[in-house]
Image (cartoon, rainbow, N blue to C red):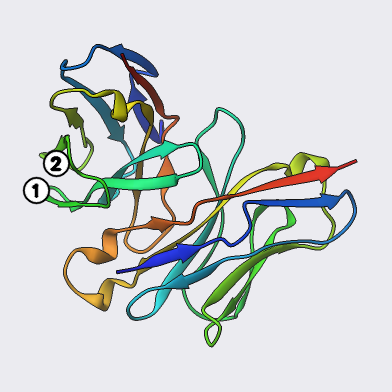
Amino acid sequence: NAGVTQTPKFQVLKTGQSMTLQCAQDMNHEYMSWYRQDPGMGLRLIHYSVGAGITDQGEVPNGYNVSRSTTEDFPLRLLSAAPSQTSVYFCASSYTGYEQYFGPGTRLTVT
Amino acid sequence: AQSVAQPEDQVNVAEGNPLTVKCTYSVSGNPYLFWYVQYPNRGLQFLLKYITGDNLVKGSYGFEAEFNKSQTSFHLKKPSALVSDSALYFCAVRGSPNAGGTSYGKLTFGQGTILTVHP
């Protein structure tokens, strides 16, 4: 099993550009989540999904969209990048109520 | 709303001494509690969890945690610290699946505690 994979590992965007961060898991987990990690802020939940076709907002959803058309994939879309979205983004997945498995992260810089 | 507090930004201990990293939580219903560790420039790694049962939970790398329902705490402990334990530690909570809705899919993290073990 590859576990949770994220692409790209690094990305630089200009303000106003859009992009999609990819996340995939091969463990047949129902739950998938996106977090951003900023210095001194810990991990903050952006969006999460409890199954294909079901998504919900987390703590900091503004400026981000998600969809969950399959169990395996959970892409995160930045609609119009802003410098405040400079961060490290982590995707995670899990079975019901159990520990989450995290991907390696995407380091995004918006200039 | 569920929340987690890690009251110490940093914990410093000498190698060989016991360590404790504190965590308190707030959640509706029965809590599912987790500890994760993050090494520099890496993703988070799972250490241990409390779902139900014995209040003392043992996990990876010799770590353990004690669930205290009355104090709503889940402190991480290790009897003898190693320099290699130096890392960023996160406590997290999610609601149990029978809480209803989709909120049980939501994992909330504390701010993290930097553990430094000195030789």
Viewer-proximal residue among A71 and A48: A48
> How many labels sit on residues?
2
Choose top left, top right, bottom left or bottom right for residue B1.
bottom left
Mark 2 or 1, nearer chain start: 1
Q: Is residue A91 visible?
A: yes
- Please tell me whether mark 2 sits on a helix, a strand or a loop: loop
Q: Is residue A32 above or below residue A37?
A: below
Identify residue for label 2.
A68
Viewer-proximal residue among B12 and A107: B12
User: If the image is split into quadrants, where does the C terminus of chain B sit?
Assistant: top right
Identify residue for label 1.
A53
Give x and y (percent) for residue B85: 74, 45
Viewer-proximal residue among B76 and A61: A61
At a point 32% along the width and 78% down the height, the residue shown is B28
Q: Read off the chain for label 1.
A: A
For the residue marked with disc 1, what is the amino acid?
A: Gly
Q: Read off the chain for label 2.
A: A
